[in-house]
Image: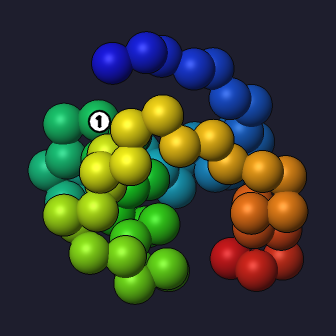
Amino acid sequence: MATTTIQISNTTRQSLEQLKEQRHAASYDLIIQQLIQKQTKVPSSMFGAIKGFKWKKEDRMETDEL
């Protein structure tokens, strides 16, 4: 898996850490995937299903949509 660095606020990091502990998740990545899946109602079987798919800027959610 390729790693990517993203910038988040300390408050967001603390929230992710709390969710990670509550759900006994192995990583922040799993928590983020769960949140995305819940928000977009994408079945878990779809994660990673479209190899090589490139997101366009207009495909990305705005922060006020979360």
Q: Write the residue at 47% across / 66% down.
A: 36
Q: On screen, 65 above or below 33? A: below
User: Is residue 42 found left or right of 64 in the rendered image?
Assistant: left
Q: Is residue 5 above or below residue 11?
A: above
Q: Residue at x 75, y 60 (%)?
A: 60
Q: Mark yes or no: residue 18 visible.
A: no
Residue beneath disc 1: 27
Of 11 and 57, the residue lying toward us: 57
Percent x, y of residue 26: 19, 36
Q: x, y percentage for residue 46?
A: 28, 62
Q: Residue at x 19, y 64 (%)?
A: 45
22 relative to 5 in the view: left or right: left
Q: Amino acid at mark 1?
A: Ser
Farthest-out residue, left: 24
Q: State the residue at coordinates (38%, 55%).
A: 33
Quadrant of the rendering where the N terminus is positioned = top left
Q: Measured from the top left, where is residue 3 in percent x and y? A: 48, 16
- Is 3 placed left or right of 11 in the picture? left
Pick whichever, 43 or 10, lies toward us: 43
Q: Secondary structure at mark 1?
A: loop
